[in-house]
Image (cartoon, grey):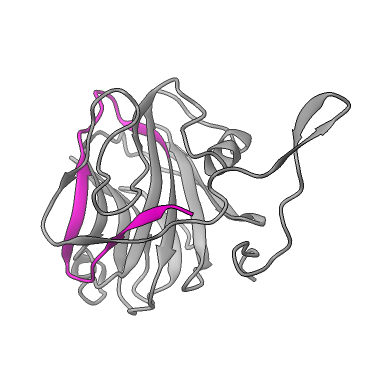
């Protein structure tokens, strides 16, 4: 396992990525909660002229949701503290979809529709004080982000997202805007070859061990073909889906 970036518990611990010329249309990243701070906070945010999209936890501290700008989206599932999840999805002009995986497979998914013709102006990752505007307490999210990938002008299938979560490098290269391993506090470089490196905002970040198994599932040969082996049993480093 390689390190990940851990954002501190202040209201202003974040990093930013230059926005693409068209809206972010697909994203994928590993997320992790260290503690349940009973506060609303975002792992990932698209700031736009009509508001912003957030991959966030609600003000109960653990309920995960993709909260699109101008759309009332359903809550997804309660995140387990101390477990890595892969959050990913597609943002279309007036609709979208989100998937949440663990190492054991798909945990939850949903689709949403809305009339918002979304155009963003910034892409940020980390934690903000967005709780006050949603009726919740000030943000004190304590969590990690790793292996962030952002695409524009394309969408990915569920199968493609699964391939992304199992690979240390981006698999789908078309439309790739930023590829951010976030392998520790000092790793803010974009691997997409577009040069969209992360700029650290206010607050601080530290290093934390990253998601297990991100280097890909073991491979075995069967009749001359290389195929994916079954995942290891649930244990210390391979985690089952949330109940």
Q: Is 151 located above or below residue 84 in the figure?
A: above
Judge left or right: residue 212 versus residue 204: right
Q: Observer-nearest residue: 168 or 55?
A: 168
**Where 196 sits versus 174, above or below?**
below
Q: Residue at x 50, y 52 (%)?
A: 86
Image coordinates for residue 194, horizontal then vertical, percent = 27, 23
Q: Quadrant of residue 126?
A: bottom left
- Numbered-mark total: 0
Q: In which quadrant is the C terminus drawn?
A: bottom right
Task: Find residue 96 and report its horizontal and vertical position in percent.
Answer: 46, 40
Task: Answer with the quarter of the image where residue 179 lies.
Answer: top left
Chain part drawn in magenta? 1-27
Camera-side residue: 88 or 206?
206
Residue 50 can be seen, yes or no: no
Position of residue 71 in the picture relative to residue 12 (left or right): right
Q: Where in the figure is residue 166, as x and y percent of width and height? A: 57, 43
At horizontal 47% and vertical 71% (from top left) the residue drawn is: 82
Question: What residue is shown at x 49% (from left), y 56% (from top)?
Answer: 211
Q: Outermost residue toward the left?
A: 202
Name the residue furthest right. Answer: 223
Q: Quadrant of residue 218?
A: top right
Q: Does residue 115 show up magenta in the picture?
A: no
In this picture, residue 96 sits left or right of residue 15: right
Instruction: Where is residue 209? Give x, y as percent.
Output: 41, 61
Is residue 33 something one can see in this rendering? yes
């Amino acid at each position: 396992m390689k390190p990940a970036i851990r954002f501190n518990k202040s209201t202003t611990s974040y990093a930013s990525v230059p926005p693409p010329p068209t809206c972010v249309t697909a994203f994928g990243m590993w997320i992790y909660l260290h503690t349940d701070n009973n506060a609303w906070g975002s792992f990932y945010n698209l700031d736009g002229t009509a508001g912003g999209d957030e991959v966030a936890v609600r003000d109960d501290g653990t309920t995960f949701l993709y909260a699109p700008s101008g759309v009332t989206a359903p809550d997804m599932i309660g995140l387990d503290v101390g477990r890595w999840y892969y959050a990913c999805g597609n943002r279309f002009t007036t609709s979208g979809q989100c998937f949440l995986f663990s190492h054991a497979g798909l945990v939850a998914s949903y689709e949403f529709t809305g009339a918002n013709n979304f155009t963003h102006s910034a892409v940020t990752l980390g934690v903000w004080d967005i709780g006050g505007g949603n009726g919740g307490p000030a943000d004190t999210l304590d969590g990690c982000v790793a292996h962030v990938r952002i695409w524009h002008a394309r969408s990915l299938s569920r199968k493609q997202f699964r391939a992304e979560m199992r690979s240390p490098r981006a698999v789908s290269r078309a439309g790739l805007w930023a590829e951010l391993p976030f392998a520790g506090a000092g790793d803010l470089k974009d691997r997409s070859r577009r040069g969209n490196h992360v700029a650290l905002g206010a607050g601080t970040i530290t290093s934390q061990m990253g998601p297990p198994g991100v280097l890909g599932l073991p491979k075995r040969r069967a009749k001359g073909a290389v195929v994916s082996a079954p995942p290891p049993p649930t244990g210390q480093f391979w985690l089952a889906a949330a109940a």
